[in-house]
Image: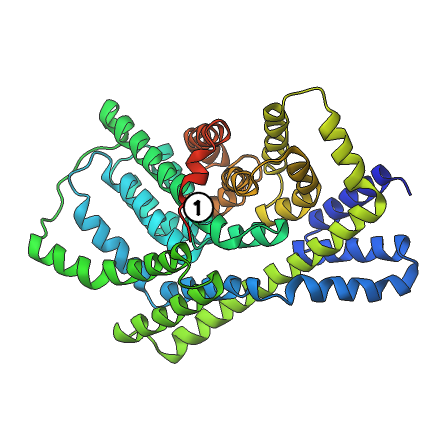
Amino acid sequence: MEWWTFLIYFFVGLTGLMMLGVPVAFAFMTVNMLGVFFMWGGTTGFSQLVLSIDSSISTFMLVPVPMFILMGSVMFHSGIAPRMIEVLDQWLGFIAGRLAVLTIGAGTVLATLTGVAMGSVAMLGSTLTPEMERRGYARTLAIGPVLGSGALAILIPPSTLAIVLASVGGFSIAKTLVAIIVPGILLAIAYVTYIVIRATLRPQDAPSYEIESVPFRVKMKNTFVYLIPPVSIVVLTIVFIFTGVATPTESAAIGTFLTFILSFMYGKLNWQTIRNAVSSALQLSVMILIILTGSAAFSQLLSFSGATTAITEWATTLPVAPLVLMLIMMLIVMVIGMFIEQTSIVLVTMPIFLPIIHAMGWEPIWFAVVMMVNLELATITPPAGLSLFVMKGVAPEGTTMGEIYMAAVPFILINISLMALLIFVPDIALWLPSLMN
């Protein structure tokens, strides 16, 4: 079988199964098993598939995935996250478009707790969007910040997708997690800047209103009690990774343990919280690990079919500058991101991109960060960004998909601008990892 024939069959089969509603993990594994059967000698090839599955997930560096997911799940189900949003609201009363700015702040905080964009969009969209509409906010300004802030969960550590990307690409998980910090902060600042400028120039889009005054002493007390402790756990986890005091796996375990302690100190650690947190974390972790096994098999099938060598030769002999090649690759990811979710994009593209990255001599961490921004963009890109559909499910009655698409446009443009900046100025992504021990 020619390599291009294999790729056509693979993508047609994968797309067909996903359109039928088969979960990504099982669709990937089904297509891989068919590929193994026809290319590796029938049923005898399944033994090699089992070895690939075992080697792809039997590794210590993947332990942070379930640990970070559990850490965020405990904070979410124990009610720590909503309390943090209330404290942020107390501090932002004087800012133009404060509810939209609060949404970005809350999304940034939730990003450090959940690492899952759809969860943040669901929570913020069901709580803050109706409140903004009640206060007379323009619908696009009531929806757009929710979409943008939810996507921050992908770009602010501890990001589950960053760990998956680093694992698939064979990159340093620690450096990848540290490298996305600065772009994540820059993106949040850009979002807030856009909102404040729009609310100042068009006050009718974000009408001001009187708020209940909270004494400074009360705000400081709430900050020290409800905001600083959970944020400190996340910061401490990142500092451990950055300084080399602990590996990402050890840092994730420490952070999860401290999260349980904090939930206990708040009086929220009961059997119901533990059961809900562990159950949701287990489901998501198993799904991600199954997807990773499919990626390993896909990489081997690519190599066996000759696609890896052919694509690498094509890319390295293409009569364009390396920067143009990078832009083409990111454009491909952007287009794919309009139709399928991020983990699938990683599994489909990274085995193809990796040989090109090495052949071109690019810094892998830089590529990973640019890729992460692109994947973050995929959550809010029409027509099929997952966060768009989640937003439709929690948006006020009467909200159309067209309005949601329009609300996402400014934040899409901000993301693209950040991605371009990272491509042309790699030091933005590489500066912080270069300081690591």
Q: Nearer the viewer, residue 359 or 100?
A: 359
Quarter of the rendering containing residue 327 = top right
Q: Nearer the viewer, residue 374 or 52?
A: 52
Q: Is residue 175 above or below residue 232?
A: above
- Left or right of 72? Residue 192 is left
| Residue under label 1 | 433
Q: Residue furthest top?
A: 319
Graded by Cα atoms within 10 Å as few (under 14), some (14 to 19) or many (20 or more), the crowding at tag 1 reads some
Q: Residue at x 11, y 49 (%)?
A: 212
Quick one: quadrant of the N terminus?
top right
Residue 268, position as x, y percentages in the image: 31, 73
Name which residue type carries label 1. Pro
- Classify residue 251 by image quadrant: bottom left
Per the image, label 1 sits on a secondary structure element best described as helix
Q: Which x, y percent locates residue 36?
A: 84, 56
Residue 134 versus residue 84 in the image, above or below: above
